[in-house]
Each structure stands twice: as structure tokens, then as C-alpha cells.
Image: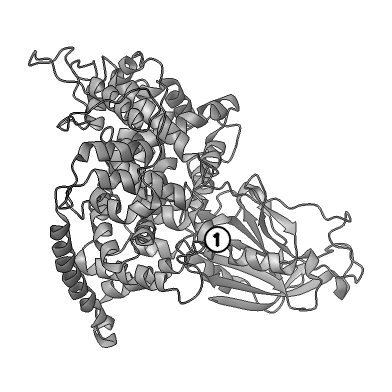
Amino acid sequence: VVYEQEGVFIHSSCGKNDDQDSLIEGILRVIEKENEVVVDWRPLDETLDTSNILCAGKDSSSVVEWTQSPKEKCSRGADRPSSYEAEWDMVTTVSFKKKPHSNGDATAHANGESKWSFLFSLTDLKSIKQNKEGMGWSYLVFCLKDDVKLPALHFHHGDSKQLIKCLEKHVALNESPHDERVLLVKTQKSLSQSFENLFDEPSYGLLQKWKKDPYVVTMGKFSKVTNYIVGSLRSSDLSNQRRPPSEMADFLNDTIPGLKINQQEEPGFEVITRIDLGKQPEVSRREPVSPEEWAKNMDSEGRILNVDYIKRSIFKGGLCHTLRKEAWKFLLGYFPWNSTKEERANLQKRKTDEYFRMKLQWKSVSEEQEKRNSRLRDYRSLIEKDVNRTDRTNKFYEGEDNPGLILLHDILMTYCMYDFDLGYVQGMSDLLSPVLYVMENEVDAFWCFVSYMDQMHQNFEEQMQGMKTQLIQLSHLLRLLDSGFCSYLESQDSGYLYFCFRWLLIRFKREFSFQDILRLWEVMWTELPCQNFHLLLCCAILESEKQQIMDKHYGFNEILKHINELSMKIDVEYILCKAEAISMQMMNCKELPQTVSEILGIENSSVTPDSDTGEDESGAELACPTSSYQSISTAVTAANGTRDGAQQLPETQSLTPA
């Protein structure tokens, strides 16, 4: 509590009578929460009927309204910012509306006393109106976004200057040029301020935080993104013309330096839009690889006989759960594919020693030492916070003093010793959780996590180069797949696809159920049928939702809300089939743009006009893996018994281009 003032009244029937019953005395507080600063006013009388207390409650349309609710619901509303699931909401349109009282008169009650209470986040504050009354006390009126005004607060036992001074520590207030009584909240602050400070002062616009460190904001408070962007990038007058996509693109390009947002009028993309990819082929999936099938592909010394076949089979059907503990070590690169059982046992011994040496490094740090090591202290604090809220509904992690949580904590702390420069970044616990769940072993889980982080490292680096690259690449792929949909998204200021940020950051971990994520990740780890298959998964999800988005004319807010609400509702098998079909569609294309070929790692004999020339400079015909892929699909399906006959696949035939 950074500010507290008693004797702050709401005049429930101002102008009608002056008896004491028309005044509600309360206490006003400004409270600093972990990621938020809130203003809270409530009556002093603890015996009030709590059925009429106002609190923030989210309805099905994701619009927060003032609603009448029981005390326990109000309590949850107050605690909402600390909720892990709320923090993970990617987008929520936030506004405030005051519902009419059920009896038609919000100030008239049986006991002659109004019993309203409210709280709001400073991120939702638009302006403050201040004034002096004839009685000598001052009052303030808080106006929230959407121009909704809260009841006036009358300071009977002191003026409101101290409150204004307190609020100015968290928001920039400027006097309105049109009314000197009104203080406007300035939505931008010096961009040179460090992100750490911004994150501690959440009232300064989410997008400015996102500019400094998108992944932390995505993990921490992305639920405010729509509210802020609409307020910052559009005029409050809804009749004003929408900003052109090019202007939005320029703004986002400034927000994430290096993120090029290509508009439809760019000449190269005009050519791409005319490319016909043809109809998407029908794709089926097979049964998961069984332990018996796995064992048949291993020689007497424990070597995998046909690595390509095993990878293709996993890509087409995934793995039986009992096989994951062993197979994931190969897929993630912890075990070499050509290693023997004895070599793997020796490797585990060496890695076990190495792991516990690193674990001892942080375990042996004394409290006095840690006081002088702010980075280690910060890593530990963030890890402890995240571990306590990672997959707690999963039986492996539920309950207090769960050994799974202890292992999760220790592995993440040890990773800080392994890569102290990167250390721990919020979101990494979500990448480790399924790996530890499958391995059920501290050392194996650590080294598999290290291998996974080698793939994901750029996503968490300060410069975000990995995220920039992926968003740009996704834009290229989606435009080739459906230029009309891309144009529609751009017309709604959504062409920069930042609503896919969380998908890419932690590889769909929050979009699918826990069991579906195990299947999805093992399929992606095969690195088939092309590079960046996860981007085609994004395309598959977006294309599946295209019809609804366009038919219902979704705008900026509706698109974000719709994408967010897909979480836990996506059919993983359907999306895998669709993404595979898209990959085949592109591989079969005779005029695949060079940019797309490079993104997918496909060698193509034809260079299309996204480069300066219309033919391959060397004049040589390059190999296209389309025919190989079709043979592979047939062979894998045949192995599952869904087609007649069996085809023997040459061991050297590889789906991934050299």
C-alpha cells in the first residue's frame, strides 16, 4: 500500500438532500501489485451487504463490466492480476460499463445507505477531473477508458494533492489544454528507460513495454494489449478514419527493429499473389510408433538401423507414450542416432557428473554471496515464481511440496549455471515441464532441455532475433498461401501477425492440451517434412479460422479475441494433417518463390519474380524433393497397413534437403 486515506466519501444522493445517510465514508488506497498498480475504494462499514459490491467480472465477450457479485467473487476480481491463466491471456478487449441497478435506483436502499465499492488498474485510467466544492473539500472523478466515469470521491479530511503526487509516480499526468481541471494520463514515457523499470511500472502502456521486451510482456500481461493499442494507435473518436496499414506497419517496425512488414502494394508480393498452389492434397496419419516397431529397427548393439524411416514414422503418427522416454533423447539430440547402447550408457554417466557439478555451483552459494550477485538472485526469484504456477493442474506437478516442482526448480537453476548469459527467462519453465514429465529423471530432463533450448535460444535472447525472423517468415508463407486473407488482416491493422507471438515463443505450449503438446513437439522434432514446419502449423491454424474471421467481418479487437480463444480448442491431428498438406502443396509448386524456398529449405528449379531474374543463373536444374516426399508418404502409410502392398524405402532416401 503506497497511499491510504480515510474520510473519502461517495455522495450517493448528491443534490437531493444533505443528511448523513446520503454520504458513504470509505477508505482509498493505491496498491502496488507485482505487475500492476491499482486504486481501491471501499466503505469503512464492514457490515455492508456484499451482494451489491461492484467488482470486475469478465463476461463471455471478454468485456469487463461492473457487476453485482458476492464477496468471494469480488475477492477473486481483486486478485485477478496475479492469476497465472489471466497473465497468459494473449488478448482481451478491456473496457468498463456500469450496469443499471436492479431496482432502478442505485442510491436508494432499504437502510438508506449506498454500498458501492470499486477498484481499477492504472493501466485503465484515462483522466482525472479535480475540483473544489463550496463546503471546502476537494473531490476527484476518475474517468476510465471508453469514457466511463466512476463516482466522485470527496476528500472530507484532507485535500487530494497527496493522492495526485502518489499517482504521478506511476503515471504521467498532464493538464488538459481544454480544461485546467482535467489531468490527462500520458500514454508514453521515455523509451530510453530500461525495460525492467517499465515492467515495474505497468501504467506506461503495454506496447511500449512490448517494444522493450516482447516475450516478457507476452508472458506477463498481454491481456492488456488490445486495450492499449486501440487507445494509442487509434483516435478515441470511432468515426475517424482507420489508420492505413502502411502507417501501422511503420509503427510496428519501430516497435521491433528489424521486423519488416510487407504491404500488398510491394511489387514483389504483387507477383506472388498470382501463383496458383493448386488444391491441397488429402493427408492421413498413421498409428503412433509402438515399442515393438521401435525395437525391430534396432540392431543387437542398440543402434537404430533406419533413422529416416523412424523419423518419418514419428512424423506421421507420433510415439506411444511408453516409448517417449527413450525416443525423445534421440529426437532432441541428447543421444546420437548412430550410438550403441553401451555408448549411450557411458554418455549418461559423463553427463550425470557434469550436471551435478553445475548444480553444486548454485547450491553452494551462501546467502552472503547471493546478496552480492544480483543476477543470480533475480534468476532464482523468477524461477521460484514461475515454478509455482507451471502446469499445476497436471498430476505430476499438483499439490504442495511436490517433488516434480523441486526438480523443475533445480533444473532451471542449473541451466542458469550452464548458460549464465541467458540465465532464466519467463517461458522456459513451460518448455521444460513436458520434457521433465516424460523423462521422470532430473539429469536426462536437463540435457534434453539443453538440446531443446539450443533450438529455441534465439527466441529468448535480448535482441529477439529469432522472433523477428519467424514473424517475417510467417508473413511470407501466409501471403503465398492466401494473399486475400493477408490483405484482409492488413485492412484490420493485423497484418503484422503479432497475435502469433506466443505460438512461436513457446511452440504452442499454451494453445494445446498437455497431451497434445507431447504429440505436436515430437512431430516437430523430426524436422520433417521441411524446415520451419512450425510456421506451417501457424498457417494451418490461421487458414482454418480464415472463413469465420472474414465472413463475420472481424476487426482488430475481434481478431485478437478470436485467436486467443482458440487456446485448448484446436484439434492437433487435424492441424498436423493440414500443415503437412500445405507443405506438399508448396513442394509441388513449380514456381515457388525463392524466399519461400529458402524458408522451407526446399531446392527449386524455378526462381520466381521475388528475385531480380526469372531463371536460375547457373542454368542448372535443381533437385526438388516433391517426388521423394510422395514416395515417403506412401511408404509410411503402407507400413501402417492402410494401403495395399508394402514398399521398401532405400535407407539413403532423405526427406530433408541437404
Q: Quadrant of the N terminus?
A: bottom right
Instruction: Please report the residue visible at 35 percent of the width from the left and 13 percent of the height from the top.
Output: 274
Instruction: Please report the residue visible at 16 percent of the width from the left and 49 percent of the height from the top.
Output: 303
Which element type, helix, strand or loop, lies under badge 1? helix
Give whichever of 627, 648 is nearer the camera.
648
Can you see residue 262? Answer: no
Q: Looking at the rendering, which quadrant does residue 75 occupy?
A: bottom right
Q: Residue furthest right?
A: 110
Q: Residues within 10 Å of mark 1 (few under 14, many from 20)?
A: many
Q: Position of residue 197 (x, y in %)?
A: 37, 64
Q: Position of residue 194 (x, y in %)?
A: 32, 61
Give whichever of 643, 247 is nearer the camera.
643
Q: Position of residue 551 (x, y in %)?
A: 58, 24
Can you see residue 364? Answer: yes
Residue position for label 1? 122
Q: Quadrant of the C terminus?
A: top left
Q: Is residue 145 left or right of residue 12?
A: left
Q: Looking at the rendering, which quadrant does residue 79 occupy?
A: bottom right
Q: Is residue 369 left or right of residue 204?
A: left
Give whichever of 253, 339 is nearer the camera.
339
Give whichever of 195, 326 is nearer the camera.
326
Instruction: Please report the residue visible at 26 percent of the width from the left and 19 percent of the height from the top.
Output: 592
Amino acid at circle 1: Leu
